[in-house]
Image (cartoon, rainbow, N blue to C red):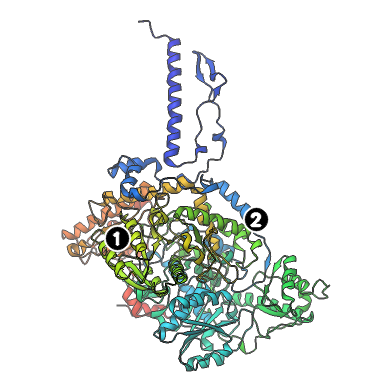
Amino acid sequence: MAPFGIPALAVAMAKTWRSAARLAAKDARRLVAAKGWCADAVSTTHVPGKYGPAMRNNAFGPSSFVRGISVTSLKPSDCFIPRHVSNSEVENEMAQYCGFKNIDQLVDATVPNHIRMKKPLDLGEFTKATKESDFLASMKKIGAKNKAFKNFLGMGYYGTLTPTVIMRNLLENPGWYTQYTPYQAEISQGRLESLLNFQTMVCDLTGMPMANASLLDEATAAAEAMTMCSALANGKKIKFYVSDKCHPQTIAVCQSRADGLGLECIVASDKNFDFSGNDVCGVLLQYPATDGSVCEHSETIKNAHASNAKVVMSTDLLALTMLTPPGELGADIAVGSSQRFGVPMGYGGPHAAFLATTEKYKRIMPGRIIGISVDKHGRRALRMAMQTREQHIRRDKATSNICTAQALLANIAAMYAVYHGPEGLKEIAGRVHGLARVLAHGSKKLGLPTTSDFYFDTISINVGDNNASSMVQRALEKGCNIRQLDDSHVSIACDETTTMEDIDLLFSVLGKGKAVSFTAESLAGEVEIDLGRFKRKSDFLTQPVFNSYHSEHEMLRYLARLEAKDLSLCHSMIPLGSCTMKLNATSEMIPITWPEFADVHPFVPEDQAEGYTEMITNLGKMLSEVTGFDAMSMQPNSGASGEYSGLMAIRAFHQNNGDQHRNVCLIPVSAHGTNPASAAMVGMKIVSIATDSQGNVDLEDLKKKASTHSKNLGALMITYPSTFGVYESKINEICDIIHENGGQVYMDGANMNAQVGLTSPGLIGADVCHLNLHKTFAIPHGGGGPGMGPIGVKKHLAPFLPSHPVIPTGAIPAVSGAGENKPFGCTAAAPHGSSLILAISYGYLVMMGSEGLTRASKHAILNANYMAHRLKKDYEILYTGENGTCAHEFILDVRPFKQSANIDVEDIAKRLIDYGYHSPTMSWPVTGTLMVEPTESESKEELDRFCDAMIEIRKEISLVEQGVYSTEDNPLVNAPHTVEDLLAEWKRPYSREVAAYPLPHLRDDKFWPTTSRVDNVFGDRNLTTTLCCDHDGLAMTAP
């Protein structure tokens, strides 16, 4: 054989290189397809010449390719999908650990084949994932379509100046917005303190002794108050009066809520309220009124109380810095919005509403309440008070279905009050009121009288018969919005952003084109503040926290100090089952503080909100495709609100068909408490359905009860995958049973993170479903809100979706051939709910695209099964599907440890804090268990760290079982361990190192809790919900 010479070697090397290049390119393409990455991010490896591969000469002769630069490699590479889905590179390794060849085999074994989607999601122009930089550029273009007119519309929404120190360090800070509801008090002391500040602020300004930690919006807060009034009358008084001077959206929401509850909501002048029949449970007054007037209500309050009816006042916090508070006027309940305390209008929200009342009504209040307690050492500590009185926990006995609140926005409002203090708030209010006084004085000089002598920020002007419309048009031509009250009257509202130049602009509008001989500045000296008998005399916000942090440095440090007390996604995964604590990406969040989105009033003419309309319409189309439905409504501004709206749509559908009697709702016993609470709110009768040993709906029990109630069956409420984290294979049969018996299927969308791109509610057989955008679609939880709960419906339910009295809404997208719109009513204060944060979900969908969304669902399943597989040797996995897999979450059964070591689920939850983790969901849906949901965003490394912690905790339990530690003194029952604990005299049977650093990595990355285990019982027995107490004395009374 001839020797292997250099020419032959060169040829062989060239062939090898070409083969390797082809394989590399093929592998790259396969990787892109498998991982869902942007194809543009992968470049080819050579550029062919005219007659084949280009060659070049070298020392060995013509042998190698010219490696040209591909066009695709020059394009932006900021693909979002691999930033969101963390484990693409190790997905098959993880699947193999679970006993499957690859991730697709795992998913095939988990999701029943007969409900799988047969083709990819078609998101239209957004099917292909958009890069992060392109998304932000597109949002700038969309935002530019919203016209920046000056707004003087009022109606509960006002321009405000968010202090930049609060915007940057709270609203835009993931250390605040990625926290969860503060159920684990020991790692939530920062936001608990801020929410306690919020409650104190509301109590001081309203003159009430107790307030909750926020509600969804002013209109729904008023509806909640109405429900309270009915409950306090034991449902025996069916009439509720609403003043015709309330905001129109408040009236509409109350009317809709009353319809479902069987109440008679009567809108009338408060002068015509008739209490003679002893059948009125309560009245609602607006203070100041929607037209701006401040009216005398003493006679109405006196008459209401004489007939044992309750008085609700819907009010304005900034106005209450100058006006006598509702509590001093005799009101029983005060509601309103804190929006103008630094929270942008955002085309309707999110904003923190409030409800304040007397202590004797505390157990019937809706929403969450923060209270002061002590830890096990007797030190002051905060917690969610009376957690067992959260109304949705009472299921069908609930008077409210509230679950999500508006904690993030309540924190902003509270910090606004902290930063400005009482004197600063008085200064802002005085300036706003002063501008309104100047405007009213100028209006009168122009021959246009105002309708009230007393007002705060809004004046109503008589512009002459049939002149109101032309006056509004003149304002539009001048680039501003004023409100038309009727043919002869307009109203104009001033706010914190109003200037004297704005008042001059309004003079030119009111002057009807004629030259105006005066200016706001020239009139100021002629005007004096005069609130007459309505002037506030009592002090407010005298507590140190509202009088200490008025410089930016001090405020910055206060914000940072509170943030440091709380565990968030900045620190570690938050594996709460049924909560989907996934990545809230920075690119998704950026647009919400842009003025072109943040500063839009919800009631501007629609041509001034074309950017919002485009975004919401596209979002509706994408969500319709994702859910398999024909249309969406964006109005519900929480998951529970979505449940209520979906059931109201079903109710309206049955009534339209003459089936008013269809009022039975079947609900599995495993359902979340908001399900039966929502059904009760729409007047349905709840019939419970049993579940079998695997957590599935008991099919025989369902058939029996569906048949028994066939004539009156209205709906079934069901969650999919089930609340036990399992795909029920007979879900489509369940839907068929309901339809055969005349009912509709309502699907709870809490677990949509295991459906997107794989199956859908519409495909499965549901008629309506709400979506938790704050779960599946990336809106952050904000420490307990905001959330959004839009509903998707099939075509036959589309006509019954909610509308709005100011800006009519309906199905998105519009559904042809569905019939005349017959909305059930109105469910939220704003036409599209909390519109501002819809931009977050829109960004998530656009940047993920079809393939990315599907990949997210697959990885949610992969991550859950990987963790379950790692932990199954140490903990029993309570429920699995037919092939031994779970969905996107799983349940760890820790109940046996109570008997073997006297360790309960709370002990494990508190010990996890020492390991740097928030506990999984405790005791739901099964008491004494932990439900774990990792989401698709967590890396394998983070999953392993959590599993390592749980495995180490199991070893600690074993030491208790073996008698090495006693049941009364061990690392679990003493958890969590604070720095103060470790610095104190140490008499534990385990070392300080075991207490603080049970795993090696904690020495480099340790989250320290700032309080020891909180005493819940003490906090409820000594209920204190504001800062108006002797904290030292409180602590000293602890055992």
The residues tagged by marks 2 and 1 sit, at their Cα atoms, a distance apart of 47 Å
Q: Secondary structure at mark 2?
A: helix
**How crowded is the residue under tag 2: few (<14 C-alpha within 10 Å), some, or many (20+)?**
some
Which numbered dot is residue 163?
none
Give the image location of residue 713, x and y in percent.
36, 69
Choose mark 2 or mark 1, whichever is in front. 2
Percent of width and height locating residue 660: 42, 74
For residue 996, side relative to residue 532 (left or right): left
Residue 314 drawn at (x, y percent): 54, 80
Between 220 and 953, the one lying in front of the other is 220
Q: Amino acid at mark 1?
A: Leu
Horizontal relation, residue 207 to residue 371: left or right: right
* Residue 490 visible in the shown view: yes
Which is nearer the eye, 565 or 46?
46
Q: What numbered label is drawn on residue 930?
A: 1
**Foreground residue, 911 or 410?**
410
Which residue carries the number 2 mark? Answer: 144
Residue 95 higher or lower than 287, as above or below: above
Q: Quadrant of the C terminus?
A: bottom left
Which SS class for mark 1?
A: strand
Instruction: Answer with mark 2 or mark 1, whichever residue precedes in sequence.
Output: 2
The residue at 23%/64% (across/down) is 903
Taking 516 as reference, is 327 left or right?
left
Residue 571 drawn above or below residue 328 = above
Residue type beneath disc 2: Ala
Q: Which image quadrant for residue 474? A: bottom right
